[in-house]
């Protein structure tokens, strides 16, 4: 399916510095630009009795915002939330001196190492705390954009919620009014104080596009990180994430307004646009865990995984059961931790594959299909059911000729569930800003109940086109 594919610019709070240390490697190793590299997932059997972190002191590994969100939603902090044991990591790096640790997972208790050495396993006696080693990538290093200059624009339109009742949506009119979202906007709910993590393949020129000026000057780009290249830059990589962000946050006076212009955003690159490999699922999980630790409320993922380069690790339709793909299992975990995960259904409706991909197949993920301006399913939009018989997608929004912000800064039209997903995601941010600390499943159920096909859901449109003003009433009536 289409890639519905950080210069670490993270808020200067102590937690984030601690967290970045926990996901980074303490050593230095130089890899050649032309030689192949190999990435392995090394899974540990436990968190260890000598783990430096403890669930009795969650401030060691979770931000205050994350701890508050979990408390408000009634979510316990468990051993699963503990970081991988740094003593284990240190021992592994001593045993494999050629390796660089590039990512970690608390939830799955693994680290990802990167090396050019293919012989290390044959001469290594692994410690008892290692339960599995899996090769997840073989190929070239992702292209670096680390030397790209940071060029923030100094001009752009200032968005003011005070004028929302008289604001013309213009080119974004249909994608907002088809969801009856303008009624929440009129009430002043525009996503304020809601944090959205965008997992994608790059955010070309977001640092200088005028349509995002209002985000930058109001410190509503909360942080960035590149989990694919492990470097301090996302603004020099592909424009897909730029267009996705625009659906939610773009603003061009009298021309365009995203669905959640007052929300705050974390921009995470998890995809290498030149390849399609299973390591991107592992990047996805690391980004989702970072989002959880930072206290993010919603994840938008315009990404999907079905088949991979050279057919290595590829899935079949029977694997689309929400339990097989590691990204689907990770997405379910994120929802269990209190994050509402929105994922595009996929663009395989006209292809041999046809069906949704991972992690859109996950039971707890809100999967979004695409419609046309005549409110019919866009033919490219992937459909369900999941291989275990569940209805997917959950709901739909405009995906054919949607208005987005291109990397040039212009308002352009583009097509894909890549854009119906964030259109819905931004709408959820507005709903969430009105009904703060409502559980993800309660929000999802209300949105589905408001759908145009709520009484007769199908695997083409799910519960149909939601009415967010009605969904708000459903939530209020249940309080």
Image: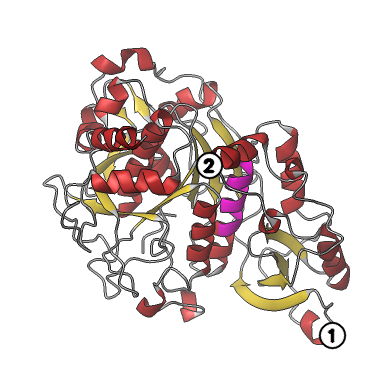
Q: Are marks 2 and 1 in contact (CB under 8 Å)?
A: no
Is 287 included in the stretch rendered in magenta?
yes
Tell me if 291 is positioned left or right of 31 in this view: left
| Viewer can see residue 6 | no
Is 292 included in the stretch rendered in magenta?
yes
The residue nearer to you, when weighing 436 against 85, is 436
Find disc 2 in the rendering and name its residue: 73
Find disc 1 in the rendering and name its residue: 123
Please identify the residue farthest to the bottom as the structure is shown: 122
The residue nearer to you, when weighing 362 against 415, is 362
Q: Which quadrant holds the C terminus?
A: top left
Across and down, in percent, residue 125 comes to 85, 83
Residue, x 42% and y 57% (percent of image)?
Answer: 364
Residue, x 65% and y 41% (percent of image)?
Answer: 8
| Quarter holding residue 90 | bottom right
Residue, x 22% and y 27% (percent of image)?
Answer: 170
Range covered by the magenta-colored residues: 285-295
Q: Main secondary structure of the magenta part?
A: helix
- Label 2: element kind: helix
Separation of residues labelled 2 and 1 (CA atoms): 48 Å
Which numbered mark, 2 or 1, is in the foreground of this view? 2
- Total numbered labels placed on residues in the image: 2
């Amino acid at each position: 399916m289409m890639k519905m594919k950080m210069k670490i610019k993270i808020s200067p709070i102590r937690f984030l510095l601690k967290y970045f240390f926990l996901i980074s490697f303490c050593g230095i190793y130089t890899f050649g630009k032309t030689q192949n590299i190999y990435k392995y997932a090394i899974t540990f059997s436990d968190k260890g009795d000598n783990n430096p972190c403890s669930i009795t002191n969650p401030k060691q590994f979770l931000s205050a915002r994350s701890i508050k969100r979990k408390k408000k939603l009634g979510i316990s902090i468990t051993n699963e939330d503990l970081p991988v044991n740094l003593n284990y990591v240190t021992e592994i790096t001593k045993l494999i001196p050629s390796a660089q640790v590039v990512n970690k997972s608390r939830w799955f208790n693994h680290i990802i190492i990167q090396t050019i050495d293919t012989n290390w396993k044959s001469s290594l006696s692994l410690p008892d705390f290692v339960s599995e080693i899996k090769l997840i990538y073989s190929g070239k290093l992702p292209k670096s954009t680390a030397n790209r200059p940071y060029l923030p624009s100094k001009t752009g339109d200032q968005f003011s919620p005070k004028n929302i009742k008289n604001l013309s949506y213009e080119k974004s009119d249909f994608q907002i009014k088809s969801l009856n979202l303008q009624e929440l906007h009129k009430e002043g709910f525009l996503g304020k104080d809601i944090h959205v993590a965008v997992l994608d393949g790059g955010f070309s020129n977001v640092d200088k596009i005028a349509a995002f000026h209002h985000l930058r000057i109001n410190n509503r780009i909360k942080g960035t990180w590149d989990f694919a290249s492990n470097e301090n830059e996302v603004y020099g990589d592909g424009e897909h994430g730029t267009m996705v962000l625009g659906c939610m946050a773009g603003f061009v006076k009298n021309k365009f307004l995203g669905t959640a212009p007052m929300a705050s955003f974390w921009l995470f690159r998890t995809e290498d646009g030149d390849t399609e490999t299973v390591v991107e699922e592992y990047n996805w999980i690391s980004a989702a865990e970072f989002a959880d630790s930072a206290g993010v409320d919603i994840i938008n993922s315009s990404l999907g995984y079905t088949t991979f380069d050279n057919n290595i690790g590829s899935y079949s339709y029977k694997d689309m059961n929400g339990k097989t793909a590691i990204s689907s299992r990770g997405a379910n975990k994120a929802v269990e931790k209190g994050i509402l995960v929105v994922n595009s259904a996929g663009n395989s409706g006209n292809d041999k594959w046809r069906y949704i991909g991972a992690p859109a197949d996950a039971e707890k993920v809100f999967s979004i299909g695409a419609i046309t301006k005549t409110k019919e399913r866009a033919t490219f939009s992937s459909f369900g059911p999941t291989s275990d018989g569940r209805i997917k997608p959950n709901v739909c929004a405009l995906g054919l000729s949607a208005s987005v912000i291109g990397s040039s800064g212009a308002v352009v039209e583009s097509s894909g569930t890549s854009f119906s997903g964030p259109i819905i995601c931004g709408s959820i941010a507005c709903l969430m800003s009105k009904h703060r600390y409502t559980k993800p499943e309660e929000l999802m159920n209300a949105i589905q109940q408001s759908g145009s096909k709520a009484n007769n859901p199908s695997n083409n449109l799910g519960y149909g086109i939601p009415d967010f003003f009605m969904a708000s009433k459903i939530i209020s009536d249940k309080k």
